[in-house]
Image (cartoon, grey):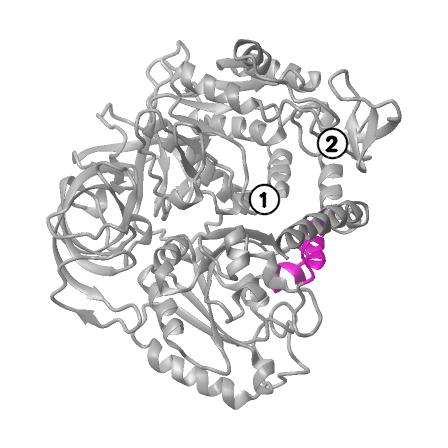
Amino acid sequence: MTKRYLDYLDQLEAEAIHIMREVAGQFEKPALLFSGGKDSITLVRLAEKAFRPGKFPFPLVHIDTGHNFPEAIRYRDELAERLGEKLIVRNVEDTIKRKSLSEPKGRYASRNALQTHTLLETIEEFGFDACIGGARRDEEKARAKERIFSVRDEFGQWDPKRQRPELWNIYNGRVHKGENVRVFPISNWTELDVWNYIKREEIELPNIYYTHERECLVRDGKLMAWSDFIFQEPDDVVVKKQVRFRTVGDMTCTAAVESIAHDIDGVIAEILESKISERGATRIDDKLSETAMEDRKKGGYF
Amino acid sequence: MDILRFITAGNVDDGKSTLIGRLLYDTKQIFADQLEAIESSGRLNEDGQVDLSLLTDGLKAEREQGITIDVAYKYFSTEKRKFIIADAPGHIQYTRNMVTGASNSNLSIILVDARKGVQEQTRRHSIISSLLGIPHLVICINKMDLVGYEEQVYNQIVEDYKQFAKKLRAKEITFIPVSALKGDNIVEGSELTMPWYKGPSLLEHLEQVPVSQDFNLEDARFPVQYVIRPLTAEHHDYRGYAGKVISGTYKAGDKVTVQPSGQTSTIKSVELGGQVLEEAFAPMSVVLQLEDDVDISRGDMIVKAAENLEVAQEFEAEVCWMHNKALKPGAKLLLRHNSTETRCVVRNIDYKIDINTLDHLEDVDQIQLNDICRVQIKAASPLLLDKYADNRANGGFILVDETSFATVGAGMVAEIEY
């Protein structure tokens, strides 16, 4: 008998493609939320595998905070152009003006939270009933419990207690009008799986994922890219560092890491390494904040 | 490198969280920030070490009560395998969560407290694993440190369990004496504490369990999820049937039948992302093109003509009920099987299965949350089903409430009436 063996990346890929096709089959107006980050870039490659030689059965939707890295925006536009797929961009700036929302102020000001308003508006504008996103269960503890088909109420809210049991590879996407489903095809992938897949598929990424020299502000031990959007205090020091970004989102809330990785192999090596060496660097902050929070809780209790 | 999906079910105090914490910790999967968070919480075990159980309980309520409520998925990998853990609660009131986690698992770790031996919950977890068709069971006899690492204690429990296990459907049962707390036989061996044990450590076992054989490569089943029709100048007449090979194998030249219509054709090509493949096998997601222009849409199943398969509307199934509102005979529900959805009626409840003993309880007039019952179902349209015991990938289905759209039941086909 011939040996039929599917590598782990092939298994993860097959699962993600199956999920995307379930979205195409079960929903009338799906969308793929595209941020320009590596996880959503991976989703786009998976969509190509799922639907070529046909077109994607959904547009790419980007909620632009206006504070994104220009490199990521350029990449986004070139990608949509090259693929010949529809790209919808909606700006947080417009929502702020139209709804007269207040812009967050101060040291940690970021439009990241305001994105939700624009997303919900966009869902309403187009009547999207499913939004595919690139979140993974290894990112965070609560995410570890979220379903692949995650039903949201009309306010876009997730209720852990109302989650539907999800068995075998059968996904229940039935919702009432006004409700929608967030779908996470790479739920079972880890950060390292994504990088290994990008390597295998030879996917081009925005160059900020690799080492480059950049002016950064040092804030709470983290390196923030210097830009016009970031809140500056008089005593802030701007330093030049060799950095790369581990995640790419809004410039005001995405920190860089020092890096010498100029290609994928270098990034993978650094991620593997980071479990040991990053401890030293991150430990102090975590300890401070964790103890602080723990103390507050205890203080309130007793 | 492949993937092993396994489930751990457990109650408070049986050491499940410590065991998972130990696997993650000793394989160096714990990130610094997670460990710091635990160390700074000040909770240490009796040896003054970090309480590894705190690594796994995610929701605030779970940490406070020291219990697991929902299924949590965790990931780690070694050079040999990627592992996906479905971490499920063990108490009887969370049976539906364990059933959910078990549905996608190939292996189940069942913890037995060496001081207490085979208990009701040991039997329940084994029975649920067996009903859900998990082929590999690993019985971890835990807390060996508390019984002086005595071989006799271990042997007695193995004997007791084997006696009970005669009624289980599992293909393979492995016993390992461990101490999750001390790390004996979890990642490293136990030459010092249990020189009498010659088998592998838990991790060694998890790394070498043969899982590729768990995919059914005999019965070819391809549920069509979506039809690709580019309608471009280049691909004017292209029609590709997109789906996942849930079992079996497909290649160009295979004679196939499309169910439920019964039309026949031949596979012209097997593709993925526009690239032609030599062969597709479970669990690959691919596109099939056929030689003939047949009418196929989502929900149809492409099978091998030689298998002479028939569709059916009436069948018996084991159903785990997952909703607060009880199920009564005559209930009409939506049934989702692969990419098909149809209405169905639950015609009769034959018996309830006592999940602590596997005994049948007759004269049951309704199914409550967490009950597992044998029922008769009639579907509104014909389905291509397999018995769950023969083909796990095509024998499972879910039941959905017609008005709330909640997933209310999980079913496994037991007998089919043609």
A135 vs B210: above or below:
above
What is the residue that sits farthest to the front in this orientation? Answer: A302
Amino acid type, label 2: Ala
Q: Nearer the viewer, residue B82 or B147?
A: B147
Q: Is residue A154 visible?
A: yes
Q: Chain of mark 1?
A: A
Mark pair 1, 2: CA separation: 17 Å
Q: Nearer the viewer, residue B17 or B230?
A: B17
Name which of mark 1 and mark 2 comes first in the sequence: 1
The subunit letter for the residue under badge 2 reads A
**How far across and down, in percent of the image, does residue A21 sit?**
39, 31
SS majority, magenta: helix
Residue B53 against residue A26 in the figure, above or below: below
Q: Position of residue A53 (x, y in %)?
A: 43, 21
Q: Is residue B316 left or right of residue A61?
A: left
Q: Counting other residues with Cα less than 10 Å from the Cα at mark 1, is it few (<14), some (14-19), or many (20 or more)? A: few
**Residue carrying label 2:** A255
Q: Residue A115, image x and y in percent? A: 56, 22
State the extent of the magenta-drawn residues as a range: B22-42
Judge left or right: residue A173 versus residue A105: left
Q: Residue at x 58, y 83 (%)?
A: B146
**Is residue B282 toward the left or the right of residue B42 in the image?**
left
Q: Quadrant of the C terminus of chain A?
A: bottom right
Residue under label 1, please give it: A140
Q: Residue B34, can we see it?
A: no
Q: Residues within 10 Å of mark 2 (few under 14, many from 20)?
A: many
Name the one closer to the observer, B138 or A236.
Answer: A236
Q: Does the residue at mark 1 contact the one at mark 2 (Cβ under 8 Å)?
A: no
Amino acid of disc 1? Glu
